[in-house]
Amino acid sequence: MGEAVADTGGQSTATAPFAIELRGISKAFGPVQANKDIDLRVPKGTIHGIIGENGAGKSTLMSILYGFYKPDKGEILVNGQALTIADSQAAIRAGIGMVFQHFKLVQNFTVLENIILGVEEGRLLRPSLAKARGALKQLAAEYQLNVDPDETIDELSVGHQQRVEILKALYRQADILILDEPTGVLTPAEADHLFRILEGLKAEGKTIILITHKLREIMDITDNVSVMRRGEMVASVETARTSPEELAELMVGRKVLLNVEKPPAKPGEKVLEVRDLKMVDDEAVERLRGISFDIRAGEILGIAGVSGNGQTQLLELLGGFPEKGAKVGGSIRMNGQELDLTGTKSDAATRRARGIGHVPEDRQTEGLIMDFTAWENTAFGYHRAPEFNKGLLMNNAAIRADAETKMEHFDVRPRNPNLAARNFSGGNQQKLVVAREIERNPDLLLIGQPTRGVDIGAIEFIHKRIIELRDAGKAILLVSVELDEILSLSDRIAVMFDGRIMGERLPNETTTGELGLLMAGITDTAHVDESQGIPPEHKHIDDVSGGSA
């Protein structure tokens, strides 16, 4: 087990103005220089944002700070003392905690069991659990982190699971908290509550390092922000002295259009008509509960909602690959013609032949075959097209030439069709999938999480292509957990919760607050508690000494 070894020549903790100071940190993985001579200072008792494009080196830098990687060179100072942080246990002993984007919780363990996991005292669990229960009650009250200690993790909402991760770090006496993309799976109300928690932690003297790609969050919550680009630290500024536009330019190295510019929609004939669509999966769980909506040519219908509320099943069913063993009911009409929901013509190939393109939510498992080349991936699903075949054989030269054209049109970098898909960044992988579907000129484009894990430059590019397709008279169904994206791109917004559509709104006649309430399953906004963003009768208030209220 690694030690957090102190350099006795360091500044005393009592007088150190910085919680974290990194000096000349460098890290390479083979020929790839992930971090190059990074300097970073994080003042004590502040919230410090770190932003940058995919591959900028943010995660590598934080992994070095948390002991996952050892730097090739450089120095780490914690509260003024130079430390060698050999592993995560050493980081914890140095007072550093990390809340990962994908939570590190045991789903069938209770909250209390997760809290003490790895820090049990002695062979008997009962004394450790009793001690943790008391500490948890005090921490929950102090930082508004109320959660039932006896509830199992799989029974908690995503927002409450995140609270458990923060409580784990605080129980381990962390004074410095690193949060990696903490709001990606939260409703707006849950995100607002998280920010109140972070402000409370800051008021108690804790130091927060926040990794996020959401510039609005950086502007709202941080005191200082550092910008990384291509493995280097290019700027560190006071948040109050900068702007989203300046930060975006620092991230990308050029001016970036943050707001989507689009002319008013000109809806035409109905392209997609969905009526009373239902789906029960093979475990008898009802995933879709009577979904109905229309989409016309030349408009974008955005589906907002927290992940896991039926959006994935809706996209898969419309795209022609529902979950195996699922029972489906209702009807779908495409350009006035009924689509087969359960028979031999309910597959993805038939959907494509009817003019439906599909950009799935998970590009790496559903949109691409990662070990295949870019040129092979740009033809998947369309490989039987006449232009890609020559007699009984596939015309690989034609597919390569087509891939080169797509990569040029969609600015895929590097522009090498012979590279395996896994060798491209997340944004360029997404561009490959989007190019494949849009270039086939579909009547209806289904697009799920179009910019998930995509850097700000690629976001701008993909948004422009979606708008261009709409303006060419195509119908688009957009599913995204990013409310800013939904509001910017959509002509109409439907909100899903628990397999139902809770309501439909026009972007210029609603707010993120109203949409957030619908995303939480709340349609009656007459008696909303402004401090929490949710009506009192819908709150999940937990008694940390026992069960839920």
Image (spheres, rainbow, N blue to C red):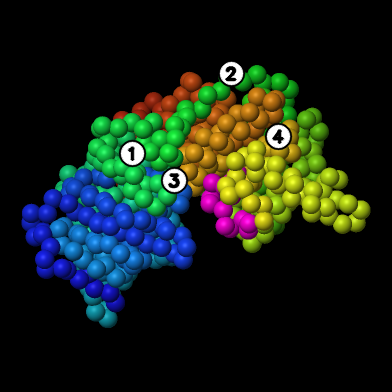
Q: Residues within 10 Å of mark 1 (few under 14, many from 20)?
A: many
Would residue 421 be counted in the magenta stretch?
yes
- Residue 507, given in percent of the width and then of the height, sits at 50, 24
Q: Are marks 3 and 2 in contact (CB under 8 Å)?
A: no
- The residues bearing labels 4 and 1 have C-alpha atoms spaced at a distance of 35 Å
Residue type marked 3: Glu
In this orientation, which residue lies closer to the viewer: 173 or 228?
Answer: 228
Relative vertical location of residue 524 with respect to residue 361 in this rendering, above or below: above
Q: Residue at x 52, y 40 (%)?
A: 458
Disc 3 to disc 2, how far (Cα)?
A: 31 Å
Are discs 1 and 2 less than 8 Å apart at CB?
no
Which badge, 1 or 2, is on the more N-terminal residue?
Answer: 1
Residue type, mark 4 in image: Leu
Task: Please report contact status of discs 4 and 1: CB closer than 8 Å, yes or no.
Answer: no
Q: Earlier in the sequence, mark 4 or mark 1?
A: 1
Q: Which contiguous range is marked in magenta? A: 419-431
Q: Amino acid at mark 2?
A: Pro
Q: Please give the residue where the numbered disc 1 appears in the rendered image.
A: 218
Q: Which amino acid is tagged 1?
A: Ile
Q: Are marks 3 and 1 in contact (CB under 8 Å)?
A: no
Relative side of 392 to 61, left or right: right
* Residue corresponding to mark 3: 53
> How many other residues sit within 10 Å of disc 3, few (<14), some (14-19) or many (≥20)?
many
| Res. 444 mark | 4
Image quarter where the N terminus lies is bottom left
> Disc 3 versus disc 4: distance between alpha carbons?
30 Å
Tell me if mark 2 has few (under 14), some (14-19) or many (20+) residues whose alpha carbon lies within 10 angstroms of its own: few
Which SS class for mark 3?
A: loop
Question: In this rendering, does residue 169 appear at all?
Answer: no
**x and y percentages locating residue 475 in the rendered image:** 68, 30
Q: Which residue is under mark 2?
A: 264
Whichever of callouts 3 and 4 sits on the residue coming sooner in the sequence is 3
